Image (cartoon, coloured by chain):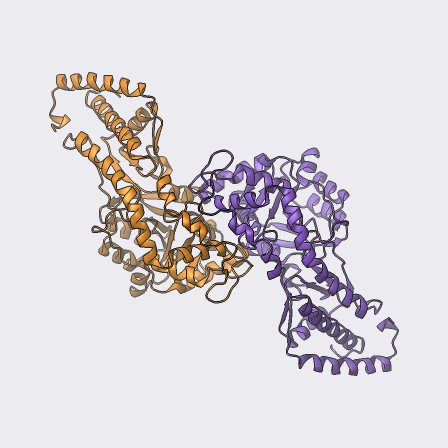
Chain colours: A orange, B purple
Amino acid sequence: MKSYMDLSKDELEQLYAQLVQEYKEAKEKDLKLDMSRGKPAASQLDMQMDLMDTLDSAADYKTEDGTDCRNYGILDGIPEAKKLMADMMGVENPDNVVVCGNASLTIMYDTVSRCMTHGVLGSTPWSKLEKIKFLCPVPGYDRHFAITQHFGIEMITVPMTPEGPDMDMVEQLAGSDEAVKGIWCVPKYSNPQGYSYSDETVRRFAGMKTAAKDFRIFWDNAYVIHHLYEDEQAGLLDILGECEKAGNPDRVFEFASTSKVSFPGGGIAAIASSKANLDEMRKSLTIQTIGHDKINQLRHVRYFKDVEGMTEHMRKHAEIMRPKFEAVLKVLEEELGGVGIAQWTQPKGGYFISFEAMEGCAKKIVAKCKEAGVVLTGAGATFPYGLDPKDTNIRLAPTLPTPEELAAATDLFVLCVKLVSVEKLLGKNQ
Amino acid sequence: MKSYMDLSKDELEQLYAQLVQEYKEAKEKDLKLDMSRGKPAASQLDMQMDLMDTLDSAADYKTEDGTDCRNYGILDGIPEAKKLMADMMGVENPDNVVVCGNASLTIMYDTVSRCMTHGVLGSTPWSKLEKIKFLCPVPGYDRHFAITQHFGIEMITVPMTPEGPDMDMVEQLAGSDEAVKGIWCVPKYSNPQGYSYSDETVRRFAGMKTAAKDFRIFWDNAYVIHHLYEDEQAGLLDILGECEKAGNPDRVFEFASTSKVSFPGGGIAAIASSKANLDEMRKSLTIQTIGHDKINQLRHVRYFKDVEGMTEHMRKHAEIMRPKFEAVLKVLEEELGGVGIAQWTQPKGGYFISFEAMEGCAKKIVAKCKEAGVVLTGAGATFPYGLDPKDTNIRLAPTLPTPEELAAATDLFVLCVKLVSVEKLLGKNQ
């Protein structure tokens, strides 16, 4: 397709008139579609319904160490759930895992909150310090940024690359400024790009010098087994193991959950870290809770049995998700390939596609889509404070709609991209 | 029985020799019994096993407002669970309730934590203030005190009476000192006495003047439907309603859970408060979590149906618990009644009996019991910092052991009480 950059002003005006007409017609369709959030589709949820039959009134509720899951007891997860979650995360030793409640986001919030009120392994509580900063690879996950903003932590953006965050910049910032206490990472099939960190990136994270002794990596391994393709799976080095090898065993908090494996909100979540970090966490946990929902932990272990059972299960999810990603990517390629007004990622896993529009166009595109009945993630949401400085990034979430809905939504999306871009090229939308 | 106070020294010495012999024989029985914590017995848990059949793979997972409980969505509880928990707590409007995860303790911790980091309705975050104090009715619940201690909050003890905390003292302290920001209350079948607050106590709480604008009552209604007797049930005024009437609508955070109604760790928990307080909480919640376990909320609603279903269910629990309480009380009365060395409460609900030994004897009694194989709650645990200034209070938890075990454990307990008391009277244990 001819690049819009090569069109004459007349050609652009002609195209513009045509796009305006198409948009007018599209609005008349009265669409009501949602590509805004990374929610599994109902058809995915239907696939794990037999999870709900795993523990009935006749079941045995004893763990392998003899604990009755129906009563109080066990602070940091039943042993078999620790093993399952360790294997899922690729963490060697289940002792490095604590299994908690229904959401990893809650563990992340709690972890930051504890650092604020109690410090880290004896360091000054962060809330007592003049200034605290976190590094935020961008575009990234809005709910990470919301946590740091909530606690008044200053966020410094670091550009993402297909290999992970710009590590020169990470090393420079973390190495020189004692106020830099942490970084948010989604290391595999990142939100929103679907990038996976290279071995070199992981090793540099593990080995780098940090000015703050209590610097911590918040390693949100949200999509660790969420592959779209059997034969093109991203690998990821075990950051815990690498940190230990590098002599920085306490550097990382790793998080994962089954929210997109079993049921969002009805799953189990875990944190992995060094013994020292987890011991400190347990000291707090013993005050925060008498224990998490062991019945749900047992339910998950009995259903999936082991990590092979989980990955097998995720293949079924991939069969539903893959055609959706491909449908969106096909429309993008057919309609915007070579046109010179956009770029996008081609994820092999995770829940999102990251889309880059021309500068200053993302907000307008999202608004145009909304006006015509298609809800996208708010432009800017992928940046701290909701501020995308170039206003280019849009996160596409293809999982929730049906394939038919997706086709309609993506058609509208590319139409809006073209319309807003041509407006910009013609100087109409200043 | 003749009071030990009226015995001559010789009689006491003779008694002592006999008690020492009995204790020696008791130790030889090699008991291994636990009366330390308020855990339901396995026979109680067996009664709600069909809760686990309520939601199977064929069930409908839609809430009454059409939300699919298997997916993301709903921050503050499904509508029918809000209604159920409101009715359980005696709160008029379900809008004043947020249903959370599996434990009210976690909500309490979170609530204190949020006050520390973010203040209350615009007040200075408590962590930014020089000094924060909480009033702690004693004896009380160790895990409450652990939360306040964890956040470095100074605890001031207030004596309990059968009508509730000494309200003259509460009013004086809360009314005069701006650093006093809260009070811990277990208003019904209190832990450990089983006392229930009188209407006057509740009204004085609702209406009193507080020096701190952001003073909050932490109203842990843990035993709201946990009656032992059908015909002798404690009532409790709705503190939310009373606070509203008194012009202090934002004064209280109320907590409850089904931990001892369905399964400890596998239940659901809720907070009730004013709209302003809950709105502030929701602002935080939206950052802390994408939502709690709606499936478990739905499971509970479908099983209990309504609060009548719950209270009916609690009658079955009472049938198991009542004989246990009565067995302990019977032994106490037979062996220690009129002996003048101890007092104890006679609860009509809740999970505990509070026992008062002679001054300076509680720790020794607990140690003697332990030495002979019966574990009690640590002496001092019912006081802030674990310090019972007179060393008199012992919390008895009769629910977990079988009736046979309870008989053996209580026999040993009264023996230890006598032994340690006579030692004291003879001046042997200085």
Q: Is residue B166 rendered to the left or right of residue A48?
A: right
Quarter assignment of residue A308:
bottom left
Where residue B112 sits in the image (x, y, percent)?
Answer: 56, 48
Above or below — where is B27 with respect to B382? below
Above or below — where is B14 with respect to A392? below
Where residue B335 sits in the image (x, y, percent)?
Answer: 80, 70
In front of the other: A76 or B159: A76
Identified at 74% across, 74% down, the residue is: B415
Identified at 49% across, 42% down, the residue is: B285
Quarter assignment of residue A46:
top left
Can residue B192 be seen at all in this image of the molecule? no
Above or below — where is B192 with respect to A378? below
In front of the other: A267 or B256: A267
Identified at 25% across, 36% down, the residue is: A355
Q: Is residue B102 rendered to the left or right of residue A144?
A: right
Identified at 44% across, 57% down, the residue is: A99
Can residue A198 be seen at all in this image of the molecule? yes
What is the quadrant of the N terminus of chain B in the image?
A: bottom right
What is the quadrant of the C terminus of chain B in the image?
A: bottom right
Where residue B178 sits in the image (x, y, percent)?
Answer: 64, 44
Q: Is residue B368 rendered to the left or right of residue A267?
A: right
